[in-house]
Every structure is written in structure tokens, then in C-alpha cells.
Image (cartoon, helix red, strand yellow):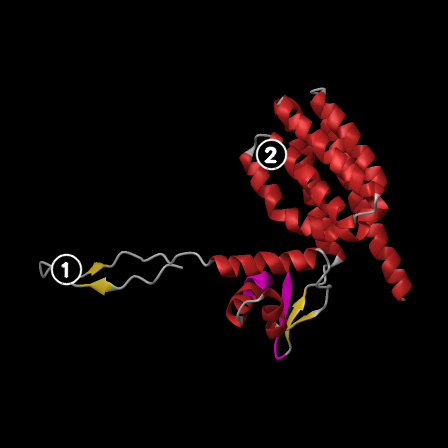
Amino acid sequence: MVHPLTPTAALDGGPARKRTPVVERPAPLREAVFEALVEMIITRELQPGQHLVEKDLADALGVSRQPVREALQRMHTEGWVDLRPALGAFVHIPTESEADQLLAARSLLEAESARLAAEHATPEQIEHLHELQRIGEEALAVDDEEVLVSANASLHTHIVKMSANKVLADLRASVEHRVRWYYLPIAQVRSKAAWEEHAELIEAIANRDAGRACTLMRLHTERTREIYQEQRRQKAAKGN
């Protein structure tokens, strides 16, 4: 935060000059609380629509209520939490439109990242892709949903990093958390096919086939988008 500029008298008696703004040091505790609460939402420890009580969250995280209050304000600004007058904070319930727009944007970003990754990948980066694929397949074999989601996110993030396009990486990072949030409910439904698609994608990148890598990533991310929509429709039908 930058303090407002305030006039001060010049030492030589001349006209008033503006004081240099003072920049406050960052608050790592507030940031840590924000990240912890977002992670709890992503993993569904805090469910969509759940009422968030500052005292309960502070006790659970072992902090005072102040950093929790500040984190909730930021989470409201970024769309993780809804603040309702006289009622408090509630975990945001994603709408079908929000999810569809996010997953559509993700598809465009990641298809381009895969194309560029095939052009710029180093042998070491390709080897790391194979390692992430192995972790995902092992998690799939034992139905470890949390590791599946984490490995999936890591693999996609690594491909974006391999693109060597910082702007693209920054744009993708801005939607990464929410993609994980939406992906978790369909992780088990999507998993076997998703990791088979990953294997094909890695092969295309390793073979420097940029066009095929782009096409495979687009189809891969679009399929995730379609399954998410199907799951929402099925859930809505059961609710009726």
C-alpha cells in the first residue's frame, strides 16, 4: 500500500514539495492464509455455498482473525467467496457460464502452449513430462484423487513453461487455481482417458510435431470441458 502524498515545507523556505511515498512491506501471513483458504476450497474441504466463520477458520489455521478477515476480502475480490450483507462470507458457487468460459479460455491457451512446447522443448523437459506422467498413472492405479489432480496440474503447467512464452504462462497461471477447482469433481470420471491422452500428447511434443501437439491438447482440454458440463447437467437433473 502506498500512503497518500502529503506536502512538506522545503528546507530553503521555498514552495512546499511532496513527500516521497512510503511502500509498506508485504504481509506474508496474510498471503499464507489466503493461499491456505483457496487450497481448502479447491480440494473441497470448504464446499461451494459453505458459510465461512472467521473465528473457526482462524482457529483451524492457528492465526488471529485479522489475516483471515483480510484474506476473505481478497477472496471476495477474486471470486472465491461471496460476502452477503448481515450474513457473512460463503464459498462461491460457480455458475455454468463461469466454468464454461474459463475452460474455453484454458483450451485456447494450452493448445498454443503445446504447439510452442513441441518447438522449444529440451530433452530434460521432455524427461520431466514422462516423470509427471508416471506419477499420474501410479495415482490412477490406486485411486489417489488428490495426487491425480496435483499431477494433472503439474503436467499442464510444465507444458506451458516449455512454451518459453512468459505472457502465455502468466495468462495461464491466472486461471490455474480455478481449473483445479473445477477439475476435482470429475477427476475420477476423466482420469483413465485423460492420462492416455497425456501420453499421446507427450509423444507428439517429444517428436517435435507442433501441429499434432496443438490438436491433441485442444481435443484434450475440450473433452474435459464437455465432461464438466455433462456432470453439472446430471447433478442438476438429480436435484430436480
Q: CA distance from mark 2 to mark 1?
A: 51 Å
Q: Is residue 128 shown above or below 154? A: above
Asked where in the image residue 129 lies, by quadrant, the reply is: top right
Query: Residue at (62%, 23%) from the top-left corner?
Result: 122
Q: Secondary structure at mark 2?
A: helix
The image quadrant where one finds the C terminus is bottom right
Amino acid marked by disc 2: Lys
Q: Which mark is residue 82?
A: none
Is residue 172 inside the magenta stretch? no
Could you say where residue 105 lies in the image, as x and y percent from the top left?
Answer: 68, 44
The three-letter code of the residue at mark 1 reads Ala
Task: Tell which circle, 2 or 1, labels the residue nearer the N-terminal end.
Answer: 1
Check if residue 79 falls in the magenta segment. yes
User: In the rendered view, would you say 72 is above or below 152?
Assistant: below
Q: Which range of residues does the magenta coloring cover?
A: 73-86
Q: Residue at x 79, y 35 (%)?
A: 219
Q: Position of residue 215 (x, y in %)?
A: 75, 30
In this figure, which residue is indicated by the disc labeled 2?
161
**Judging from the image, what secondary structure is the residue with disc 1 in?**
loop
* Residue drawn where x is 55% and y is 37% of the image: 167
Please say whether residue 79 is visible from this viewpoint. no
Residue corresponding to mark 1: 10
